[in-house]
Image (cartoon, rainbow, N blue to C red):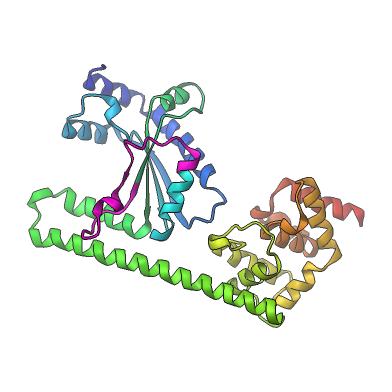
Amino acid sequence: MVDVETWLQSYSSSFDAYRRAAKHVEERVREALEGRALGIHSISVRAKDPDSLAEKVHQKGYKDSNEVTDLIGVRVITLTEATVESVASRLSSMFRIDAGRSADKTAELGDRAVGYRSKHLILSPMRGGLGEVAEILKGTFVEVQVRSILSHAWAELEHSLRYKFGSALREDLSRRFTLVAGTLELVDREFSSIEEEIQDQIRATADQIRAHGCDELEITTMSLLACLAAIREGAAPLGPAGLKLAYEDAFRMGRLLERVGISTIGQLRAALSDNDVGDVLRGYAELTDSDPDQCSAIVVIASIVAMRDESLFESVRAFQDQHLRTSVLNRACEE
């Protein structure tokens, strides 16, 4: 077993390599969660600061480097508590998890306590990277903390204002942190409930579009999501609760449609019936060995934009799929 002080010195001298390894881990985690409708606010990754590591090792009395599971730490912050479990499940399906070292801090609170709410997943040493980075990853655990933005705010402030002061903090001030934790848990649940009701409203609007057409309905984030649910049922879900787009994407796509002269559901229906748009979708489906009716909402809206304003199509990063660009180019060459 390597002497702890020797190991700490070795870590400090190799810190730049650990930071490069952390960057590689970040890429892997972002890739695992990319394109998933998980309501993620932010993803951050860091290699543990050498001074902070030394403080923790001495405080905890660690005798072995394997006792430290957060040399590389990841934080995935979700918008609400409702999607924490989905993010954790997705990561568990993509990486090897050390169940014995992982922890569900929310479950540990039980029914009668409030406080720190988070899931801590310990990823087993992984393969990847080159040279020194690969060697580091083969022998290093990675801790992934998954929590909501409100839980994260509480944890950061509690750590700075209660944990750092320890027993010197007055008991009434310490209790107020606990009360705030309970309040934020209620707020988190209310935000999740509001989101569910918004999704119910989208589904109800989709039912109206199926039943009555609603061609005069103005395109908004709400109506666009409802329209796509109603008339593109086979499209892959890219948003929460099976919606065809994430909320932010629906907002952006609505603005793009407006820029090419489509402001109502009726105009969107007409655009989807356009032969040129149909040709692009069929070409894309052929290139990707898929069904035109299953093309994602991003591809569908990109095809409409491309047929009306090629320069706008070229400028939108979300449309830079090589198969899509090839299909648009092939359609233009046929004219």
Q: Is residue 52 above or below residue 33?
A: above
All told, the count of numbered labels is 0
Residue 240 visible at all: yes
Q: In the rendered structure, does residue 116 fall within the stretch colored magenta?
A: yes
Residue 214 visible at all: no
> With 238 as the anchor, is 74 left or right in this view?
left
Tell me what residue is drawn at x 23 percent, y 50 percent.
Answer: 159
Quadrant of the rendered structure where residue 212 is?
A: bottom right
Quadrant of the rendered structure where residue 117 is?
A: bottom left
Q: Which residues are magenta?
A: 92-119
Image quadrant occupied by the N terminus = top left
> With 145 as the anchor, is 41 left or right in this view?
right
Judge by depth and name the residue closer to the eye, 294 or 156: 294
The x and y percentages for residue 105 are: 29, 49
Residue furthest to the right in view is 335
Helix, strand or loop for the magenta stretch, by majority: loop
The x and y percentages for residue 88 are: 43, 48
The x and y percentages for residue 184 are: 29, 64
Tell me what residue is drawn at x 71 percent, y 62 percent.
Answer: 301
Judge by depth and name the residue closer to the eye, 71 or 290: 290
Judge by depth and name the residue closer to the eye, 144 or 254: 144
The x and y percentages for residue 31 are: 54, 42
Q: Is residue 94 above or below residue 320?
A: above
Residue furthest to the front in view is 111
Image quadrant occupied by the C terminus = bottom right
> With 299 as the anchor, is 100 left or right in this view?
left
Q: In the rendered structure, does residue 167 fall within the stretch colored magenta?
A: no
Tell me what residue is drawn at x 25 percent, y 55 percent.
Answer: 110
Q: Is residue 92 above or below residue 2?
A: below
Tell me what residue is drawn at x 41 percent, y 25 percent.
Answer: 136
> With 192 as the anchor, is 33 left or right in this view?
right
